[in-house]
Amino acid sequence: MNVSTKKWICLKISSLILIPLMLWFILNFVSIYDRDFTEITEFFSNTTSKFLFSLFLVFGFLFSALNISEVFEDYIEENNLKNVANRLLYLSAIIIPLFTIILLFI
């Protein structure tokens, strides 16, 4: 299978996974929006909320990294610059959610 085809399939799968996670996040964000700090920390101390929010972060960053990578492929002509940009993008798409998840579970 071609690399572009694999990226396209990953993009579609991650978007399908993000739909229910986004609905869950929006509904819960609306419910805790006007709450005080203790109720928000109580929400994020729930194991189910931690797990779903972690999945939301991972798939959200994966989806955005795949989309931005396609922009790099289309608009950056120099291969070395394109490779560096893609590697930095994927590295940040791994480090930022991982760091956030670690802080969430501490």
Image (cartoon, rainbow, N blue to C red):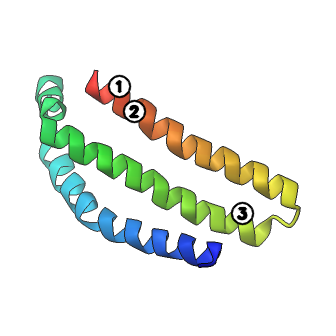
Q: Is residue 45 above or below residue 97?
A: above
Residue 80 shown left or right of residue 8 in the figure:
right
Cβ atoms under marks 3 and 1 closer than 8 Å:
no
Residue picked out by circle 2: 100
Cβ atoms under marks 2 and 3 closer than 8 Å:
no
Residue type at numbered disc 2: Thr
- C-alpha distance separating marks 2 and 3: 26 Å
Residue at 12% in and 34% down: 46
The reply to whether residue 73 is visible in this rendering is yes
Cβ atoms under marks 1 and 2 closer than 8 Å:
yes
SS class, disc 3: helix
Q: Quadrant of residue 34?
A: top left
Residue at 46% in and 51% down: 61
Q: Is residue 22 above or below residue 73?
A: above
Residue picked out by circle 1: 103
Crowding at mark 3 (Cα within 10 Å: few <14, some 14-19, many 20+): some
Residue 54 drawn at (x, y percent): 31, 43
Residue 91 drawn at (x, y percent): 60, 42
SS class, disc 2: helix
Residue at 51% in and 42% down: 94
Residue 79 drawn at (x, y percent): 85, 61
Residue picked out by circle 3: 72
Q: Which mark is residue 27?
A: none
Q: Is residue 46 above or below residue 52?
A: above
- C-alpha distance separating marks 1 and 2: 5 Å
Residue type at numbered disc 1: Leu
Q: Earlier in the sequence, mark 2 or mark 3?
A: 3
Residue type at numbered disc 3: Phe
